[in-house]
Image (cartoon, rainbow, N blue to C red):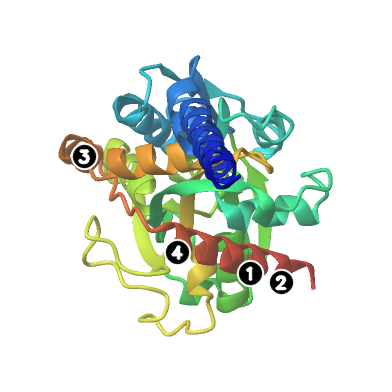
Amino acid sequence: MRKTMISLGLVLILTALLLGGCGGTQTTDTSTPEASQAEVNWPEKDITFIVPYNAGGGYDLKARLLAEYMPKYLPKQVNIVVKNVPGADAKIGTLEMLKSTPDGYTLALADPLHLALLELAGGLEGHDPASLAWIGQITNSPSLVVISANGKYKTLDEMKGQKVSFATSGDNIPAINCLAKGVECVPTLIAYNGYPEACMAVARGDVDVFMGTAESVFKNITSLEGKLLPVALIGGQSSLVPDVKTTEELGFSSVDGMSGRLRVMLAGPPDLDANVTKILVDAMDKAMHDPEFVAQAEKTGYVVEPISQEEVKKAVQESVDAGRQYGK
């Protein structure tokens, strides 16, 4: 009886160990962490960057620069294709991204503050700009205000209480609104198809003022050879125009500096897979810190400003909140 009990006990123990061992082996062989699986399987095809403005502008150049360097930091080598979808104040291109399948293959360049304004106008068709999958920040530039060298206004002080026409390319509407309010002028907005066209209109005297990202406006100042005069910066100084004062330095402290800054970020549609998002965030961050990328950006006059994901979330929420204030 004792031998039987011992033998039965050994059988039970060995059976338990065998089953446990088989179970452990089976689990190890068949399970793969989701993140690792995503890294193996994604991306499987080319990625599209939608630029909701015409080719040749600041957004377009930044998208193409990032599209050149970001692929080498993806788990699988694919191309990133830049697609220009201009129209309706960036609404058409932005909606194409928002309505795309949230698989990471369709992303867009956007300014969260500008998207908040589109939201107020019903242009996002119910989408919350804060709910997008914000991948990272490319630039965060102050606005440079320019006038015609032969225009009727020579300073911001002269615009106080006057009817002033502003050229808009869409992304500069928040900056125009905050400047007009701070200067206490009556603004009239005239739409133009991109920075070059808007700057040319100011140079000709067709419109009084234009403003946009410092680096993009500066390029037009250079190309128009003295026909445009920079008169102020909104949201901070710029090394491109070291002698130009900020609106605060000029005595217009009520001008909202944050609304004057133009952020260019990369975003995907809401509900983007978390693992795919992580891959994109990591690849973009590495590309933005690539010495060759930084050097190329500096050659084109852009100062890249990558920030952490925590900072991205904070910046997006602050920008969206600021944009929504215009509706109150």
- Please report whichever mark, 4 or 1, sits nearer to the chain's N-terminal start: 4
**Badge 3: how crowded within 10 Å, few (<14), some, or many (20+)?**
few
Label 3 residue SS:
loop
- For the residue pair 23 and 219, the one nearer the viewer reads as 23
In the picture shown, does residue 153 fall above or below 246?
A: above
Q: CB of mark 4 within 8 Å of CB of mark 2?
A: no
N-terminal label among 3 and 4: 3
Cα separation, mark 3 vs mark 4, equals: 20 Å
Find residue 192 and report its horizontal and vertical position in percent. Answer: 59, 38
Residues at discs 4 and 1 in contact (Cβ within 8 Å): no
Residue tagged 2: 325
Tell me the SS state at disc 4: helix
Q: Which mark is residue 290?
A: 3
Frontmost of labels 1 and 3 is 3
Q: Position of residue 100 (x, y in %)?
A: 70, 28
Secondary structure of residue under mark 2: helix
The residue where tag 1 is placed is 322
Q: Are circles 3 and 2 on residues that touch, CB within 8 Å? A: no
Q: CA distance from mark 3 to mark 2?
A: 37 Å
The residue at the point 49 percent across, 16 percent down is 44
Q: Is residue 328 left or right of residue 43?
A: right
Which part of the image, by quadrant, shows the C terminus? bottom right
Above-or-below relation of 209 to 4: below
Q: CA distance from mark 4 to mark 2?
A: 21 Å
Measured Cα–Cα span from mark 1 to mark 3: 32 Å
